[in-house]
Amino acid sequence: MESTVVRVTTGTREAVHDITAECGRFAAAQGGDGLLHVFVPHATAGVAIIELGAGSDDDLLAALADLLPADDRWRHAHGSRGHGRSHVMPAFVAPFATVPVLDGRLALGTWQSVALVDLNLDNPDRQVRLSLLKG
């Protein structure tokens, strides 16, 4: 198994950050066939396979805002207002995804991208672990 860590700065607002290119470069460097496992070692972030750039990323953030409002209802209450929802989000947007790799290329569908989903305004510096298990 080959593995690396990619660092991502998500900024000061909620983000759906495209990491497809980083995933593709890592898979290409390893070559061959296998499974790419994408994992964020954070309690407040997730990984989504989703269409990006056509409004779906904004729709995802809007759906999460409806489902997990940034208000004072959360028992986990340190940090910015509504921070507790960031700790609940990975139950809905898992902190991992697996993508098939064929001949060193991600076997994603036409409109699929790999994205880091981050609602946590208190920590803009993220790590994403990419691991390729070769077949």
Image (tube, rainbow, N blue to C red):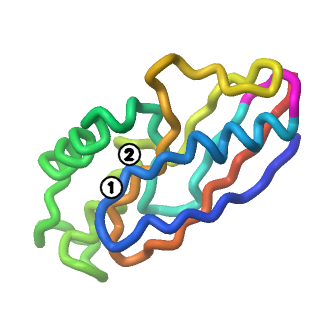
Q: Secondary structure at mark 1?
A: helix
On the image, the x and y values in percent for residue 83 come to 27, 71
Q: Identify residue for label 2.
A: 91
Front one among 120 and 106? 106
The stretch of residues the image draws in magenta is 31-35
Question: Does residue 6 lie above or below 82 as drawn?
Answer: above
The three-letter code of the residue at mark 2 reads: Ala
* Count of numbered badges drawn on the protein: 2
Q: Residue at x 44, y 57 (%)?
A: 45
Q: Main secondary structure of the magenta part?
A: loop
On the image, the x and y values in percent for residue 128 come to 62, 56
On the image, the x and y values in percent for residue 60 come to 26, 41
Front one among 36 and 67? 36
Question: Does residue 129 lie above or below 126 as drawn?
Answer: above
User: Do tag 1 and tag 2 residues touch (Cβ < 8 Å)?
Assistant: yes
Sort mark 1 into few (<14), some (14-19) or many (20+) by Cα contacts within 10 Å: some
The N terminus - image quarter: top right
What is the number of the mark on residue 88?
A: 1
The three-letter code of the residue at mark 1 reads: Val
